[in-house]
Image: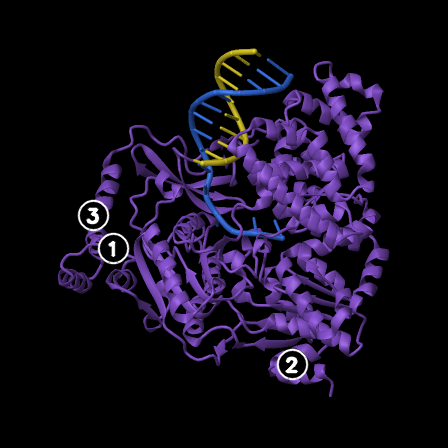
Chain colours: A purple, B blue, C yellow
Amino acid sequence: MSDFEKSLQTDLNKPQREAVTTLDGPVLVLAGAGSGKTRVIAYRVANLIYTGKCEPWEILAVTFTNKAADEMGDRVHKLVGIKGQDVSLGTFHRTCSQILRRWGQEIGVPQEFTILDGTESAIVAKRCMKALNVDINHYDPKAVASRISGAKGNLIHWREYQERAIDRYEKIVGEVYEAYESALEHAKSLDFDDLIMKTVDLMEDSPKTLDYLQNRYRYILVDEYQDINRAQYVFTQLFAGRDRNICVVGDDDQSIYAFRGADPKYILNFEEDFPGALVIKLEENYRSKSSILNAANALVRHNPKRHYKNLWTDRGEGDAIQFKYSRTDEAEAIDIAESIETFMKVDKRLYNDFAVLYRTNAISRIFEEVFTQYAIPYQIIGGFRFYDRKEIKDVLAYLKLVMNPWDTVSLQRIVNTPTRGIGEKSFTKLVQVLTEHDIGVHELSYREDLWIQLGTYAANRVIRFCEMVRTLHEEKDSFSVFELTGRILDETGYSRKLEQSDTIEAEGRLENIEELMGAITRFDEAYPTEGLPVFLEQVALIQSQDNLDRDADSVKCLTAHAAKGLEFPVVFVAALEDGLFPHSRSYHDPQGLEEERRLCYVSITRAMDRLFLSAAYSRSSSFWRTRGSLGGTLPSRFLAEIPEDLIEPVDIASKMALRGDASIPGQVPDAVRETVKAEYSELDGDWTVLPGAYKFAEQQGELATVRANRRQAKLDEAPKEPSGYAVGQTVCHPKFGEGKITKIQPAGGGDYFLQINFTSEGAKLLSEEKAPLTLVEEEE
DNA sequence: GAATACCGCGTTTTT
DNA sequence: CGCGGTATTC
């Protein structure tokens, strides 16, 4: 028996082995959290190669994150050696981008296309809306862009979208969609959704290419199958359509991307798509202690529609999960910082062993502050990314424009950075000329016949700029990316401008550019044969998780979304407050709440040995301040869904927040209140010891009364004016689109609540005063 | 027409 | 607080 065969026996449990050794035909692996799915995929790939079922390059494995792909690559490499490098391993977006770069010309995709991120897509949408005279106040460009994105995720082209549009809002979106597509086409640019959709188009419209791809990739593996959208689903169907050698791995309990079109129905329907599919459940969890796993199971059991499974573990019970309810967000962070320090001393842990998880990026700020004070090394994953900084985006825009001089999005960004006297009017005119004659800026520099169309005001300056781009474009292939960037910084005057301004801010920007140059050097060294297009592709598809430095000894702070697929010995899930986690934007409809619950499940199941849950009575982020909230947050309802014996409150305040019926303001049981008072007097009234407890008991009661009184007073104040709307009228909202008013009720203070049933977004309750609504005249 | 100085708004999660 | 939009000056 070879070493590999031995390891199949020793490293895998029975269902895992079955998933690894059943190589032909469709296989669905329902892999619970921590059940070793990465291992299964890696072994399966290795086994395909080992048994000679196919050559390494005939395997396509698709994951959702670069990090998962890298990890998979490492493992395969360890198992089968150098051959493993020939396996096609990547994210959906990267895989599609590579396919399009090679075969996209079949359907007219230019070879050196630019990839637009979400912000850039919105910029294009906005530009198109302006050109079409669509009122920006009436239709929010970001919302319109996101509708377009949604349509593309469902493989709906603009023509079909227009045919299906049922109200004026959608008709406008349809028009913008059409203009947006032609703008992208001229700019030789693809947005994120195009990467998938155009690849599907390619396979559907070019039988030759489909045939080639199906021959080339004979064994398909898809990870995180619960998170695919329709476009990605069709992509996998096309690949596996002929040989049906497809293995998908996923967990419907960890589906957390519905907001971007992910639909777990695809994993739930796999057996219908591929009759006779082998279904394997991986239910043994190798990651967490049972105290943690039981809590996670109990929580997710509150979701009605799921594939049944029961995760269990052999890792022992472990310590109880602790819950701490702090008075302020700062106190919460301090508490976590001190816990980390204690752990370091007592358990000899590394900073690397800890992670702080939260629902929204905004929460990270307080941890940054407190960890800095405590001199705890930390890394914020996601949030403000390095590549989101202005100066980095500027330099990258120059690189993009040099690679693709048709790219008017990058052009817009840097044509006047540093200022060269080319303002909005000149820019609009420039784009008009470029689009009309379908040329890039480099070509304009020798099209003297067109110069007159630029107008007289800025023509000279525009032409000088085009000349500069042309030179760089023509010479780009004889330089490394590093050299090219150096020339750009130099010749465009970008560096000079920053050096001259002599401010601290400019200094920081120069430092960041230095850092970018470092990254570029590393790229040049790692991929000496690849040039600008591959570099730009890599940058465009960078993910927040990619910043995660596994080797650096630091506490990791990240959102629950970013934490997916990762594990940590000690996990703190912070800011578990109703409205934050579950988030207030989601918890009004059952589906949203279920996704929040899955997100919480994902957070909990990241923990291996210890799990700490926490919430704060008041949170001082700008978000709450500007809303003028009274504070007095309530612990997340998810805490109440975990059985009492699995969570141990660390003090009275926490106990009360957890066990006192805190979900109903003012209903803290008297018994709990008495306990607090007793304990409080025992401690000699030392407020610093139990800061939240007594206040909580008092204020929950008082606050509730104050709030109820205010609400009543407001309602008593009869509206002077009747509502400007009537039931049955159709209104338009810049973000939500069109909808019919189904109910009007006084909100006090002369305002009204309108219940509106939106065509595409469902029913919402909006304030007449605050919501930017406009009445839509009925047609006919 | 462009550059600069101010005001107001908005923040869920991300490829 | 930072960005995008508007008002004012060059």
Can you identify the residue that label 1 sits on?
A692
In the picture, the quarter occupied by the C terminus of chain A is top right
In the picture, the quarter occupied by the N terminus of chain A is bottom right
**Residue type, label 2:** Arg
Say left or right for A669 vs A54.
Answer: left
Say left or right for A677 vs A492.
Answer: left
The residue mark sitting in front, 3 or 2, is 2
**Residue type, label 1:** Gly
Q: CA distance from mark 3 to mark 2?
A: 61 Å
Residue A144 shows in the view: no
**Residue type, label 3:** Thr
Can you identify the residue that label 2 sits on?
A17
Q: Chain of mark 2?
A: A
Q: Are both tags, 1 and 3, on one chain? A: yes
Which residue is the extreme one toward the right? Answer: A208
Q: Secondary structure at mark 3?
A: helix
The residue mark sitting in front, 1 or 3, is 1
Residue A159 shows in the view: yes
| Residue A705 circle label | 3
The x and y percentages for residue A672 are 20, 63
The x and y percentages for residue A654 are 28, 61
**Quarter-wise, where is residue A179 in the image?**
top right
